């Protein structure tokens, strides 16, 4: 993540969005794997609100400073808002079936498909941005 932070806010948001989508796919896959488990309550990962809160905080997120000596002055004591962990919640208030399981397989499959499409699109945007940086550094020479 240190190298991503050097390129700016857009690249850092792309990186964290890809992380969030990958995590949510793992959570959704876990829900799908437990579709037949009696009493299982589905998990939900919300990374969009975390990223939105970091960006709409009134100022752009800052790279957290690191001190290497006890006499150094600490920088950005509040840390980097883009590095906050994503919110993983468990839905316990609903039940889809009589056995207490609340996993809706159709909704989970739709979510995993939506996340895959979004992940592919963001990965393509990231690839193109790094290709532009590579071209700028090499002055268009391969």
Image (cartoon, rainbow, N blue to C red):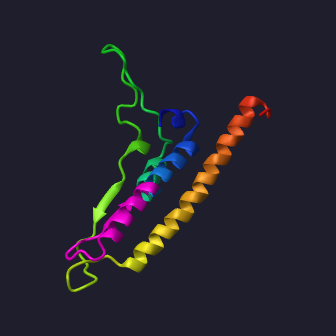
Query: Which residue occupies 29% across, 62% down?
Result: 89
Quadrant of the rendered image containing residue 94: bottom left
Does residue 142 belong to the magenta stretch? no
Residue 71: x %, y % from top left: 32, 13
Q: Is residue 25 magenta?
A: yes
**Looking at the picture, does residue 27 appear above or below residue 109?**
above
- Residue drawn at (39%, 59%), measured in percent from left and top? 26
Judge whether 84 appears above or below 92 on screen.
above
Position of residue 101 relative to residue 61, above or below, is below
Using residue 118 as the reference point, say whether residue 42 is left or right of it.
Answer: left
Task: Determine which quarter of the picture holds residue 24.
Answer: bottom left
Residue at image position (25%, 85%) is 97
Counting every numbered tag in the picture gives 0
Q: Position of residue 2 (x, y in %)?
A: 48, 33
- Position of the C terminus by quadrant: top right
Residue 91 image offset from top left, x and y in percent = 27, 70
Locate residue 3, reporting x and y percent: 52, 33
State the extent of the magenta-drawn residues as a range.
22-47
Which residue is depicted at the point 44% across and 48% down? 54
41 w.r.t. 4: above or below = below
């Amino acid at each position: 993540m240190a190298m991503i932070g050097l390129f700016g806010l857009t690249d850092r948001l792309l990186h964290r969005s890809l992380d969030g989508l990958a995590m949510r796919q793992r959570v959704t896959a876990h829900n799908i794997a437990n579709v037949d488990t009696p009493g299982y309550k589905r998990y939900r990962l919300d990374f969009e609100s975390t990223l939105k809160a970091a960006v709409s905080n009134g100022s752009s997120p800052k790279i957290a400073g690191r001190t290497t000596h006890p006499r150094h002055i600490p920088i950005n004591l509040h840390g980097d808002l883009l590095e906050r962990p994503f919110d993983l919640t468990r839905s316990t208030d609903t039940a889809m079936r009589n056995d207490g399981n609340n996993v809706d397989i159709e909704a989970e499959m739709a979510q995993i498909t939506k996340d895959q499409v979004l992940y592919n699109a963001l990965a393509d945007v990231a690839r193109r941005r790094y290709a532009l940086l590579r071209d700028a550094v090499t002055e268009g020479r391969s």
